[in-house]
Each structure stands twice: as C-alpha cells, then as structure tokens.
Image (tube, rainbow, N blue to C red):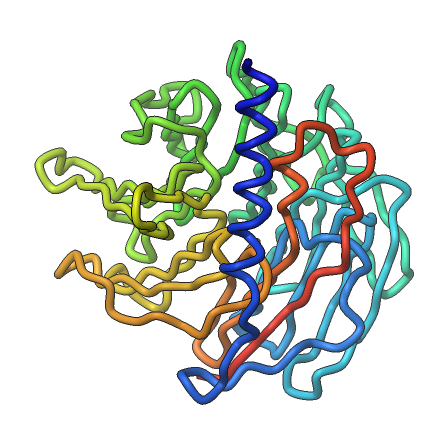
Amino acid sequence: MLNHICTKTLKFKTSLARKVRHQRPNCKLGMQFECLKNVPEDLVSSLLVSDRTPHINVTAWDGTVSLYDYNANELVVRMKHTDPLLCSAWLEHGSKKYAGSVAGEVLEVDMESGKFHLVSDAAELGISAMRCSENDVLAGSWDGSLQALDTRSGKAWFTVRHENRKVLALDCAGNTVVVATTGGKVTIYDLRNMHNPKLQESGLKFQTRDIKLMPSGGGYVQSSLDGRVAVEYFGQDSSRFAFRCHRMNLSDTQFVFPVNALCFNRSDELLYTGGSDGRVFSWNLTTRKKSEELPKFEDSVLKLGCNDDVFCVATGDDSFKTLATIQDADVQPGKIYYTKL
C-alpha cells in the first residue's frame, strides 16, 4: 500500500513539475536576463558575486570552480578538483578563494597557478557550508563539525562538533555566525567568544535549506523544504515571524516547493527567495508583503546572488531528489542567469 502511494505521489510530482516549468523566463515581464556562457556541466552548488569587481564565482557538483566576468559574459578561468565541490567563500571580495569538497576538504583555490591547496581535511564528511570573515574561514560539515581556520597560518583556532546533527547552512557578518543544523536548531556564535554560543529553535518545522544574516547584523532569515521563511531579530522575540511562499494552489490541494536560496539586496528590508517552482520573489520585511515577482524560470532556482550592479540566478533540474531511486537519474547542466540592476 505504501509503495502504491509513493508511486502515485512521484507520478503526480513529475507531472506537476512539467506544468510549472514549461515557461522560459519572459524578459518582457520584468528584468532583462541573460545567460552566462560556458556554465558547468553539473548542478551549481554555490554562487558568489563580488562587491568590488565584475566577477561571479561558481562551484558545481562536477568538481569545477569557475570565475566569470559578467560585464563581458565570459569565463575567465576554470579549475577542476577530483571530488565534487559543495560550497565556496572568498576573502576581501575575491583576493583569496576557498572551496569545500564532498570528501571533507577545505581548499584554497589558487587560480593563478591553477592548483588547489589543502587547508584542512579534519572533517569526516563533506563540507556543506562555508563563509569568510576577515582572515578566517568558517567551514561546516555534514559530520556536524564547525571549524574556524586562520588563512594566514592555515590552522584551525576553533573546532566544535554539533553532536548527532549535520550542518546544513551557515552565514557570518561582523562578529556574528549563525549555523543551521538538522533537528531544527540554530546555533549563534560570537567570533570574539566562540565557546559560549546560543542555541535556539529554528522556527521551522522542516529541514533548513538556506540561512542568511541581515546586512545590518540585526537578525537572520532561514528557509525550509516546506515553502516557509522564518525571520528572526536578535533580542526582539516579539518581532519574529514566518511566512509561506513558493506554493501552488490547485483545486483540491496545495503543492509546496522547497525554498532553496535567500538573498538580501543592500538593506534588511528587501529579501529575495528562490524555490524549486522556478520562481524568484522579493519580499518587503517591513510591510511583510511580497513586493515583486520575477519572470519564471524553466527549472528549479538553486542559488541567488547579487551586488549593487547585478542580480544572479542559478537554476537546474533537481527533480531527481523526489525519485525513489537515483540510479537512472539523468542530471542535465544547469543555467546561470544574470541581469544588470
């Protein structure tokens, strides 16, 4: 009986996915998007946009790290590691680049020499999330560990293990670090005193997909598998709230899509969300209302990134995640769209 239900559910999801993905981005409806050339052959795992140079840094599951010039729409350099790369970070807006592998390695990416330099292999499972803060690289892993690595010495000055929990996402701004883990937990660290973190409930019932600190550092937002976003303000419990998004209302049911990506644009007020329904919405967190809906994309929105000049959207077909088995899954190359602001 359970197998029969699962089979019907998978067929329904496949059919519905085709319906919601049939339309390519219609530039007449909103932003004028272009596609980056020479994108990776596998799904994008991370996307970074520099604040100072016209560069986009992309890692992918095929083990590549690619640097693009969005003004010229060209690939500047591409390197390939032996293992899939899951995340990336950079210091001082690109002066030093780092990547995390599925083998648990924290790697410095030297694009001038075309070589990867091992910084740490202490994690037992893949490096799932990574951020930089001044001279430090913060790396979280599926084994539950969080490392703070000094990029000057290449040594870890802080390591902790979140027992029985996987690190799903993390972010940092100033001295604040937020780490989302399985079990519906968020751990908040202060880089000046990492040994006394604050542990709190995530405010979401289902697994976290992304977490982002507000540009001001006054709080954070996180998204989940069940089409929800939670908004938290530090020291203001009465101001916290959550909202539903990326859902499709049918005649007799509601279909819910994961919210895979979050992105702030300049201030705490405007938040972009990207989901597996192929849509990107912007939300005014002050009025708590949707302010804009971008043109619909063909595949799931996997990653978002922006600076003052450009807005980027990485898409790909992640429908294989709903299959009972992935042995016959045919993963197609994704696409990276960008538009000038």
Please give the name of the residue rendered at 39% of the width and 37% of the height, measured from the top-left corner.
226
Which of the 4 quarters of the picture holds residue 187? top left
Question: Which of 315 and 161 lies nearest the eye of the viewer?
Answer: 315
Q: In this view, does 144 lie to the left or right of 235?
A: right
Give the percent coordinates (x, y) of residue 82: 90, 42
* Position in image of residue 14 (x %, y %): 59, 46
Camera-side residue: 172 or 242? 242
Q: Is residue 173 above or below residue 180?
A: below
For the point 82% across and 49% down, the residue is 62
Apparent side of residue 209 relative to residue 138 in the rendered image (left or right): left
Position of residue 246 in the picture relative to residue 76 (left or right): left
Q: Nearer the viewer, residue 320 or 149?
A: 320
Q: Which corner quadrant of the image does residue 232 belong to?
A: top left
At a point 85% along the width and 39% down the height, the residue shown is 83
Which quadrant of the view contains residue 341?
bottom left
- Residue 6: percent from the left, percent from the top? 57, 25
Figure check: 229 above or below 56: above
Q: In this view, does 214 lie above or below 252?
A: below
Give the number of marks.
0
Q: In which quarter of the image is the N terminus?
A: top right
List x then y, in percent, for residue 163: 52, 10
Q: Which residue is drawn at 21% across and 38% down?
A: 234
Q: Which residue lies furthest to the left in this view?
A: 238
